[in-house]
Amino acid sequence: MKHGSPTTDRYLKFLTHDMPTLESILTCPRCGYAKREAMPTNACLFYYECEECGTLLRPLPGDCCVFCSFGSVKCPPVQMESGCCEQGAPDTA
């Protein structure tokens, strides 16, 4: 492979691409309780119940999951700029 070729550039980008962070600290907006949680890499987490006060967290408008709304780190698909499982949370009305 010749340096500067499209094939080499893609390969180098693949080798040097950072791996996503797989843990995030979710913080309840109601009581402030925070807990470190593992993030799934193949699914969005739409609902999360706060262990302290029982509040059911759901993604804010425009976010795909609770990690993107209430976490210290966005979900792995968003970190990798590949989009998330779905654009926005499911309709629960």
Image (spheres, rainbow, N blue to C red):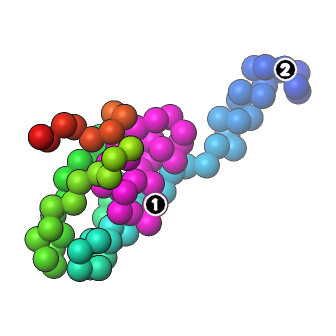
Q: Residue 15: percent from the left, percent from the top?
A: 67, 39
Amino acid type, callout 1: Val
The nearer-to-camera label among 2 and 1 is 1
Residue denoted by label 2: 5
Q: Quadrant of residue 41?
A: top left
Q: Quadrant of residue 30?
A: bottom left
Q: Nearer the viewer, residue 76 or 34?
A: 34
Q: Main secondary structure of the magenta part?
A: loop
Task: Look at the image and say whether residue 79 sits in the magenta stretch.
Answer: yes
- In the picture shown, does residue 78 fall above or below 32? above
Q: Which mark is residue 73?
A: 1
| Labelled pair 2, 1 in contact (Cβ < 8 Å) | no
Q: Quadrant of residue 31?
A: bottom left
- In the picture shown, does residue 64 fall above or below 38? above
The Cα atoms of the two marked residues, 2 and 1, are separated by 34 Å
Q: For the magenta stretch, what is the residue range?
A: 63-85
Q: Residue 82: percent from the left, percent from the top?
A: 50, 34
Position of 62 with respect to 51 (left or right) is right
Q: Residues within 10 Å of mark 2 (few under 14, many from 20)?
A: few
Q: Give the residue at x 32% y 52%.
A: 60
